[in-house]
Amino acid sequence: MRVLKTLWSAFLLASCLALNTTEPRHTNNWAVLVSTSRFWFNYRHMANVLSMYRTVKRLGIPDSQIILMLSDDIACNPRNAFPGFVFNNADRQLELYGDNIEVDYRGYEVTVENFIRLLTDRWPDEQPKSKRLLTDEHSNIFIYMTGHGGDEFLKFQDAEEISSYDIADAFEEMHEKKRYNEIFFMIDTCQANTMYSKFYSPNILAVGSSDLHESSYSHHSDTEIGVAVIDRFTYYNLEFLESLEKDSKLTLQDLVDSYTFEKIHSNAGVRTDLFQRNLSDVLITDFFGNVQQTVVDNVEDDLLYLTNHDQQGFLKNLSAPRISEVEKQRKSGFFNQKKNMITLGACESKQMSSTKLITIGTVIAAFFFFANYFKI
């Protein structure tokens, strides 16, 4: 009887492991981009966040998986010498505002309350899905914040503040609700590194532009615009990211290694103790890219087959070109009539289901073998 109990326990343990180890850990990427400032003299903060917005879109994250929060009071500001335009460089070669921008929270919607609600998904029923962070336990989330801050706080709209404790507790609630796989938190503000000092939830990587009692500096100004157009930390992050393509093999360690005092004029910080993976093993596209891929079958030939055959699969009496060749290929098993396009995720799901069944079946067979062997 004792042997039977032991075998049964081993069977249950192996079954649980088979179910858990085959589940995908990372299937989608999201970005939350927040400028917490307003007013004309904070032009650079809006340029910071719009620059990051452009980068994550270029690398493949769709607008449906980007939450953009900004005051949106710069492009049409009466002081703007270039109405409707926002630039991040004095040469004004790259226009950031454009026609292809989706702002999810603008103006007075950019509040501490809405930011916390966004992370924790505590919304009333009428909140539209387009303004919600619809992540799950397989989501990697890039969170970028820029504005004016201090020791363990960041100002919102010069009216309120969010503390490092607030963000830490929001991340913990996200962890308990299984709303993320990994989080990459980046902040560009004065004393930025203090904003992640209170984090305590797992699988969070955090970087900041400046240490305690240090300022975060702007990079340069545009004399015609009249104000600074971008911050140094964001500028050099973008300089690095602009060299990337969607299939880049550069890692987060490469990005972190690019932070130097000579460039940023402050001590950029990195916190890795909560992050389980080694940064040299984490591709930058694990957070900045789009992990979804598709495999396209030969649609043209399949359509030709369907055109020239009836529902029973017999050749129609049509004088269409390539019929004999199509029929020949069909008989050789060339065509797949069920699907013309499948996602890699669906293929992987089927493979994982098969693996689960095989593993569990093997365990059951072993259980009955030993039960019979010991004559239980």
Image: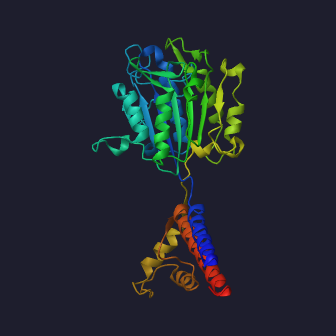
Which residue is rendered at x = 59% and y = 84% of the image? 332
Res. 8 image quadrant: bottom right
* Front-most of residues 289 and 2: 2
Q: Position of residue 222 (x, y in %)?
A: 54, 15
Residue 337 appears in the figure: yes
Looking at the image, residue 288 lies above or below residue 223? below
Q: Position of residue 356 (x, y in %)?
A: 57, 70
Residue 96 appears in the figure: no
In the image: residue 78, left or right of residue 13: left
* Front-most of residues 129 and 212: 212
Q: Quadrant of the C terminus?
A: bottom right
* Front-most of residues 225 and 233: 233
* Front-most of residues 272 and 237: 272
Q: Position of residue 58 (x, y in %)?
A: 54, 41
How many marks can you see?
A: 0
Which residue is rendered at x = 63% and y = 20% of the image? 211
Looking at the image, residue 167 lies above or below residue 334? above
Res. 202 image quadrant: top right
Q: Quadrant of the N terminus?
A: bottom right
Q: Position of residue 138 (x, y in %)?
A: 52, 52
Looking at the image, residue 11 lies above or below residue 127? below
- Which residue reaches farthest left? 126
- Scheme by which the image is coloured: rainbow
- Which residue reaches farthest front? 1
Res. 109 image quadrant: top left
